[in-house]
Amino acid sequence: MSSLEQTLRGYISQHSDHGIFLDTNVLLLFIFALYQPSKIGSKRLSKYSKEDGELLIQYVQKFSRILTTPHVLAETSNLARQISKDKQSKELAETLYPLFFHDTQNSFVKLNIDEILVNADLFGKLGLTDSCIAALAQEKQLLLTDDLDLYLATNSNGGDVINFTHMREAAGII
């Protein structure tokens, strides 16, 4: 078993009950892998394949819930609308609405960002959404990201973080 596999299994053991935090690009891939896989490979999802989506679903489903923030949901919603057009856009919006707004078993859990301390240097380097994500990950939220700068910042500050590109490489997808 590779060290990445051991790390991924360790994160499942440690965080499965609490949940996994997906950054915007990974959440976007997750949504399209579940609801409109034919869109993977186009526009904002051009670097991903259906196999990437399947890998992501398999790993994320090992966690009790998906954690997010209002910032991530706003970015994800805007990007999803750019990818999915016409009738498919309406269908996707109807599917996502309860996940984004309701407090049900399958909806996304919005973390409170009001009380987190965001480092000014990190904000300057990563921007609002990602600096908040990095600060939350330092508070022991497991983060799954495909953003190298966010991964490095979170990792260097002691947060639990997975780089999705590493998962894709280990799975032989890229």
Image (spheres, helix red, strand yellow):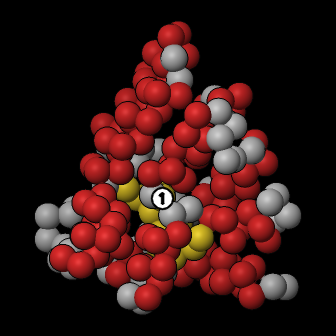
Screen quadrant of the N terminus: bottom right
Question: Of all residues shown, which one is farthest toward the top?
Answer: 87
Is residue 123 rendered to the left or right of residue 29?
A: left
In the rendered structure, the answer to whether residue 11 lies left or right of residue 94 reads right
Which amino acid does the dot numbered 1 rest on? Leu
| Residue 19 at least partly seen | no
Viewer-proximal residue among 36 and 81: 81
Q: Which of 156 and 5 is in front in this view?
A: 156
Report if residue 72 is visible in the image. yes
Seen as rendered, the residue at the extreme left is 115
- Secondary structure under badge 1? strand
Identify the residue shown where x is 36% and y is 39%: 100
- Percent coordinates x, y for residue 97 in the rendering: 38, 30
Estimate the x, y position of residue 108 in percent, counting from the top left. Answer: 40, 48
Q: Name the residue under label 1.
A: 22
The quadrant of the picture occupied by the C terminus is bottom right
Q: Picture quarter containing residue 157?
A: bottom left
Instruction: Determine the residue positioned at 63% across, 64% down.
Output: 164
Residue at the (71%, 28%) spot, across then down: 38
